[in-house]
Image (tube, helix red, strand yellow):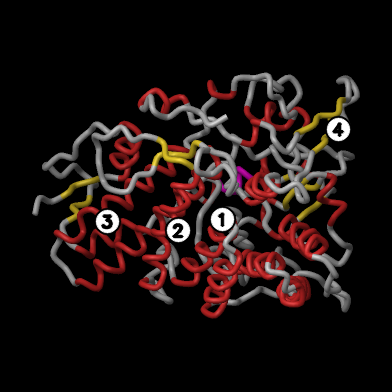
């Protein structure tokens, strides 16, 4: 078997150029992939980065410092998204390597899947490596299709343009786009074939485990409207890891500034460690720009909700560079990120699986069980004796409560953007967002900006660099 020699930089370059070949001379600092064990090591990528700047402010949950937006309404993606500006050609803007990072990771997975069987080593290692690689391949395709295409709608998915499916390792092909339905079929097939082969206890936290695999499968089923399958997969995930941190414990021990049990890699809720930026320091810096929640979301938190009181602030001399006092928004307490408490904004947590399960039950009309799992989460997040919600009498009322909990629990990253897209395909849950801006800057005329449920802004354009290299990659709006 020919030895494959790679460096991380080579992986990144070939993912987008699809034309360079690997060499046979080992460069300094490279790794020779010549065994099943070294292929398995390739799956580990501690800093999987998904920078959300190309869509982040297309949401009712998030806010921005006014000086970052005023004058930039057609000059930056933040300005365009925050003012819901449909008149600008977004296709000329970069997505800050979001697309590249997804497909670099897919290339990494395919390199393992396509080559590991020829390498010497234990068959059990090969089987596990291929299963983990398929799960990560599925994850990246799922994120890509929900970013760059329409949300899954069973009435149109078979004809809606999706993204390129990369199902094998190749540096030469120019792939074509598949439909949204085809991408979902591919993702579901990859996960269904793989999750049972994952370990419950992987060699380290950066390898996907079985709880994450079933949690991801439940999420994909939910987006695909397979309610019973979403319920069953979520139950399997929680059977392996149902841990929820009791925020009362943190609050009673002096708050996150003093009680740092769940810092770094020690958050037992986290099922997959993935980041908004490439590095812990960069992740914290990202919160300086994207760590604000909207006045609307601030008002939705109950006074007893520790998700707000432990993590957000509206006062303090150190936040003035990033926050407008008097705006009604609130900013994430920046020092809390990673060093004091690992809040995984992109990767999955058990809390998301609880909410996936609650929604699946609600969609199936089992409102008692839906309320049960919402209340289990709330009991770990709110203080006082009145944490439980009363079981509603209709599916719509239950769904409204679940959507509210998703907004308060699944902050930052992709969650609200993806939820708005998928709920906007259903008339009873679709939302027109209105934003009055600016609030504190009196020298600029205050306007009301509106984002309709069917806005083309919800479909992010493919970056120019990717379209230049692949003429098949036409935008989906």
Of the numbered discs 1 and 4, the one sitting upstream in the chain is: 1
Disc 2 to disc 1: CB gap under 8 Å: yes
Of the numbered discs 3 and 1, the one sitting upstream in the chain is: 3
Q: Nearer the viewer, residue 213 or 297?
A: 213
Query: Which residue does the numbered mark 1 point to in the structure image?
Result: 224
Q: Is residue 295 above or below residue 200?
A: above
Query: Which residue does the numbered mark 3 point to in the structure image?
Result: 113
Look at the image and tell me whether residue 86 can be seen: yes
Q: Residues within 10 Å of mark 1 (few under 14, many from 20)?
A: many
Exactly how many numbered labels are in the figure? 4
Closest to the camera, between mark 4 and mark 2, is 2
Of the numbered discs 3 and 4, the one sitting upstream in the chain is: 3
Residue shown at 45% from the left, 47% from the top: 183
Query: Which residue does the numbered mark 2 point to in the structure image?
Result: 188
The CA span between labels 4 and 2 is: 40 Å
Location of the C terminus (image quadrant): top right
Indicate the position of residue 115 as horizontal and vertical percent values: 20, 54
């Amino acid at each position: 078997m020919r030895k494959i020699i790679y460096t991380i930089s080579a992986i990144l370059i070939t993912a987008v150029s699809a034309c360079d070949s690997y060499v046979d001379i080992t460069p300094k600092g490279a790794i020779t992939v010549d065994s099943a064990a070294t292929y398995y090591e390739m799956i580990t990528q501690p800093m999987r980065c998904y920078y959300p700047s190309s869509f982040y402010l297309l949401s009712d949950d998030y806010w921005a410092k006014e000086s970052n937006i005023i004058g930039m309404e057609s000059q930056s993606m933040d300005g365009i998204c925050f003012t819901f500006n449909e008149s600008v050609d977004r296709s000329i803007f970069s997505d800050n390597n979001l697309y590249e990072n997804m497909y670099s990771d897919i290339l990494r997975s395919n390199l393992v899947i396509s080559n590991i069987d020829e390498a010497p080593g234990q068959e059990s290692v090969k089987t596990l490596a291929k299963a983990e690689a398929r799960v990560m391949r599925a994850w990246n395709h799922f994120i890509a299709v929900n970013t760059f295409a329409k949300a899954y709608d069973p009435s149109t998915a078979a004809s809606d343009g999706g993204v390129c499916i990369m199902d094998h390792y190749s540096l030469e092909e120019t792939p074509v786009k598949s439909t949204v339905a085809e991408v979902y079929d591919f993702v579901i097939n990859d996960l269904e074939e793989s999750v049972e082969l994952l370990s419950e206890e992987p060699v380290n936290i950066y390898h996907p485990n079985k709880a994450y695999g079933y949690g991801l499968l439940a999420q994909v089923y939910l987006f695909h409207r397979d309610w019973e399958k979403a319920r069953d997969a979520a139950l399997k995930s929680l059977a392996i890891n149902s841990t929820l941190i009791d925020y009362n414990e943190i609050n009673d021990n002096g708050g996150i500034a003093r009680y740092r049990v769940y810092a770094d890699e020690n958050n037992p809720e986290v099922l997959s460690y993935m980041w908004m930026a490439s590095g812990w320091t960069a992740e914290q810096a990202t919160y300086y720009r994207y760590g604000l929640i909207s006045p609307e979301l601030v008002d939705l938190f109950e006074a007893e909700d520790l998700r707000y009181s432990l993590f957000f602030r509206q006062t303090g001399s150190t936040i003035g560079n990033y926050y407008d006092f008097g705006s009604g928004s609130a900013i994430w307490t920046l020092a809390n990120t990673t060093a004091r408490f690992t809040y995984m904004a992109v990767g999955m947590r058990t809390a998301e699986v609880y909410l996936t399960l609650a929604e699946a039950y609600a969609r199936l009309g089992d409102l008692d069980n839906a309320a049960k799992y919402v209340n289990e989460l709330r009991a770990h997040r709110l203080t006082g004796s009145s944490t439980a919600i009363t079981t509603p009498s209709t599916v719509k009322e239950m769904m409204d409560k679940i959507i509210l909990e998703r907004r308060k629990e699944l902050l930052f990253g992709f969650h609200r953007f993806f939820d708005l897209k998928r709920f906007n395909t259903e008339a009873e849950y679709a939302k027109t967002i209105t934003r009055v801006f600016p609030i504190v800057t009196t020298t600029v005329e205050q306007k009301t900006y509106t984002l309709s449920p069917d806005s083309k802004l919800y479909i992010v354009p493919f970056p120019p660099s990717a379209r230049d290299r692949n003429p098949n990659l036409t935008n989906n709006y």
